[in-house]
Image: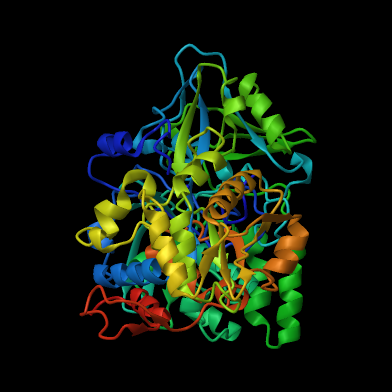
């Protein structure tokens, strides 16, 4: 299993060139979240938060999609400037991007080819059946699509604010607000059929004909209620919180988020916010807040007048288990036992006529090895995402295809900027020159091609489809340093270390007679990270830097050395997990709690200027530029 922030090998079975040719000139930029070191499984990103599914097809009431040109109102120059600052100062060192393996059976099922644009969604098992892109073949007797789930089905529950055992069947039973096309960077309507942002007012309209499984219509008030519960539960710290209640005033929530009509809800932002930032946060939300189930919790929190009352009301919400949920998706709750959850087609869903799958079941498979075997022996028909090493993929039947889905996130090296010598950018750059990121990614991917070495360490993602060169850095890519990818990189590294006061004696870099020691700490349980860091350590050692992997159990690492800043170099995801826009990545690198509290990143940097219309001094505060990205242009 990969790390909590868990990408570019030219040996990938689906090469970047081939994929770009298949898609045309479009790129990929997907949604990513700051997971800060929690042990989230790859497949089980919580619904209702900012992790989410994307898709390719339209929906709703004929509303046109929002294109990248329409939505990208932020200054490209500001994005490029932040990328250049990151590239020139390396507050973190991006090593690889992750490609998730997603599996689909083709024996009894029609599915798009593995290299199809339609596979670039979170997740194919969730979106393709909804859109009629994953269907039963004519004449097949199999009427049940079978997947896997982590938790014991009978112990699963569907209160997303409870935080425990959120059942895998949620993917079929609840609809997301919007769909996001990872390949074209387009938002498409789904449960929310229309949206409008007018200054600080965001208006959301529910798709006509959208009902709960008991026949009640989905209302704008329920959309508002879900958003409110998200804010109450996070204390205003996550998702929309910083944009709705930046001062953390929970008393403001009832006035700032309201149902304004049978099918409309309004969000009043504290200040204007770039549209792409708002949509990135809204699109992946799965609507859970059915009035008959959650209305009392919303009213309890809205009416709380003291912190004690609010704490009690929040406790009531988070203690509640929703074991037989009323959903709104194309499949409805049927039953669950100790081994499987069963959902059946909801004939009154707006997309029901596109779906010919009567049932979906989720089998209890609590570990990767069991999931591998189920795919190999045909017990399951696919998996949303699952790391499966090459020695196992070779055993898959011919009818089981593997698609690679870009995660726009991956393993990186983070530095404690209060520890010598990595507080010196010359040392960080020397490290970057020495490491062969392609080799680290290849070994981390264990023959699957699911990890891609970062070409331009810049804080930008989209390596898989050339989106960095072809979109974000278009016109300026030659200004960026690739580090570690040319034959003479060791000469560059040596010059930097010499300039920093080191000399090489008897094959080892030293300063004042002391060897340069750079151990790398990380979580031992993440086997792909272990393989990657072993490769990195060998590069440093070969260059004359004393290094070793210090891999610890998760509790010791994430709960101890990492959060205490007890490291010089450590492993963590370098991008903001499950968000679409570069804003979120730069905010993670320079402004997240991890960056400020654990990595001790400075507030100011000295970096050469790329665009003089963005800044006029080499002394720069990146968080100021990041704030500009969240603000719509005049």
Residue 203 image-quadrant placement: bottom left
Residue 308 image-quadrant placement: bottom right
- In this orientation, does residue 210 appear? no
Q: Nearer the viewer, residue 477 or 184?
A: 477
Q: Quadrant of the N terminus?
A: top right
Which residue is drawn at the image coordinates 56% and 21% (left, top)? 394
Q: Nearer the viewer, residue 206 or 56?
A: 56
Instruction: Name the residue at the top extreme.
Output: 139
Q: Is residue 403 above or below residue 529?
A: above
Q: Residue 227, how many percent across, how many down?
A: 53, 67
Residue 235 vs residue 76: left or right?
A: right
Residue 405 vs residue 276: left or right?
A: right
Q: Nearer the viewer, residue 458 or 152?
A: 458
- In this orientation, does residue 617 appear? yes
Residue 460 image-quadrant placement: bottom left
Residue 541 vs residue 468: left or right?
A: right
Q: Is residue 426 above or below residue 45?
A: below
Residue 531 vs residue 314: left or right?
A: left
């Amino acid at each position: 299993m990969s790390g909590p922030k868990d990408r570019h090998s030219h040996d990938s079975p689906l090469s970047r060139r081939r994929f770009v040719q298949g898609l045309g000139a479009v790129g990929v930029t997907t949604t990513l979240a700051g997971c800060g070191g929690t042990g989230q499984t790859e497949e089980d990103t919580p619904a209702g938060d900012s992790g989410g599914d994307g898709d390719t097809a339209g929906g709703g009431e004929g509303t046109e999609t929002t294109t990248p040109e329409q939505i990208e109102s932020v200054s490209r120059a500001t994005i490029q400037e932040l990328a250049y600052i990151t590239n020139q100062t390396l507050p973190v060192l991006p090593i690889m991007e992750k490609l998730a393996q997603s599996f689909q059976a083709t024996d009894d099922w029609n599915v798009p080819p593995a290299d199809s644009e339609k596979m670039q969604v979170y997740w194919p098992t969730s979106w393709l059946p909804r859109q009629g892109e994953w269907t039963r073949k004519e004449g097949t007797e199999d009427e049940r699509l079978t997947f896997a789930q982590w938790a014991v089905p009978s112990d699963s529950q569907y209160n997303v604010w409870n935080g425990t055992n959120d059942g895998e069947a949620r993917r079929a039973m609840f609809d997301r607000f919007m769909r996001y096309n990872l390949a074209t960077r387009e938002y498409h309507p789904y449960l929310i059929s229309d949206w409008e942002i007018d200054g600080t007012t965001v208006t959301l309209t529910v798709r006509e004909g959208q009902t709960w499984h008991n026949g009640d219509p989905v209302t704008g008030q329920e959309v508002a209620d879900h958003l409110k519960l998200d804010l109450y539960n996070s204390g205003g710290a996550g998702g929309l919180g910083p944009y709705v209640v930046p001062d953390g005033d929970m008393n403001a929530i009832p006035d700032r988020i309201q149902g304004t009509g049978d099918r409309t809800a309004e969000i009043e932002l504290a200040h204007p916010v770039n549209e792409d930032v708002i949509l990135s946060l809204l699109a992946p939300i799965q609507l859970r807040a059915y009035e008959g189930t959650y209305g009392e919790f919303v009213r309890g929190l809205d009416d709380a007048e003291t912190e004690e009352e609010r704490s009690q009301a929040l406790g009531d919400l988070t203690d509640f288990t929703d074991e037989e949920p009323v959903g709104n998706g194309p499949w409805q709750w049927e039953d669950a036992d100790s081994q499987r959850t069963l959902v059946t087609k909801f004939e009154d869903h707006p997309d029901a006529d596109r779906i010919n799958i009567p049932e979906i079941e989720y089998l209890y498979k609590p570990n990767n090895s069991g999931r591998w075997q189920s795919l190999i022996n045909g017990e399951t028909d696919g998996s949303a995402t699952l790391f499966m090493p090459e020695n196992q993929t070779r055993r898959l039947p011919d009818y089981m295809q593997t698609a690679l889905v870009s995660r726009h996130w991956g393993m990186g090296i983070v530095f404690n900027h209060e520890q010598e010598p990595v507080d010196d950018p010359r040392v960080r750059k020397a490290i970057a020159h020495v490491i062969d990121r392609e080799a680290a990614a290849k070994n981390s991917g264990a023959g699957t091609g699911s990890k891609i070495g970062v070409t331009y360490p810049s804080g930008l993602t989209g390596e898989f489809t050339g989106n960095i060169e072809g979109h974000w850095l278009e016109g300026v890519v030659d200004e960026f340093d690739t580090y570690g990818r040319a034959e003479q990189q060791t000469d560059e590294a040596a010059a930097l270390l010499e300039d920093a006061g080191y000399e090489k004696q008897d094959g080892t870099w030293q300063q004042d007679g002391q060897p340069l020691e750079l151990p790398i700490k990380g979580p031992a349980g993440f086997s792909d990270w272990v393989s990657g860091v072993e490769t990195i350590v060998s590069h440093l050692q070969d260059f004359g830097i004393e290094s070793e992997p210090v891999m610890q159990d998760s509790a010791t690492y994430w709960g101890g050395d990492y959060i205490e800043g007890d490291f010089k170099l450590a492993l963590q995801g370098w991008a903001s997990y499950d968000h679409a826009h570069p804003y979120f990545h730069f905010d993670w690198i320079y402004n997240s709690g991890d960056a400020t509290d654990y990595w001790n990143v400075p507030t100011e940097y000295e970096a050469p200027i790329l665009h003089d219309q963005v800044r006029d001094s080499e002394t720069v505060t990146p968080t100021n530029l990041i704030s500009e990205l969240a603000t719509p242009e005049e």
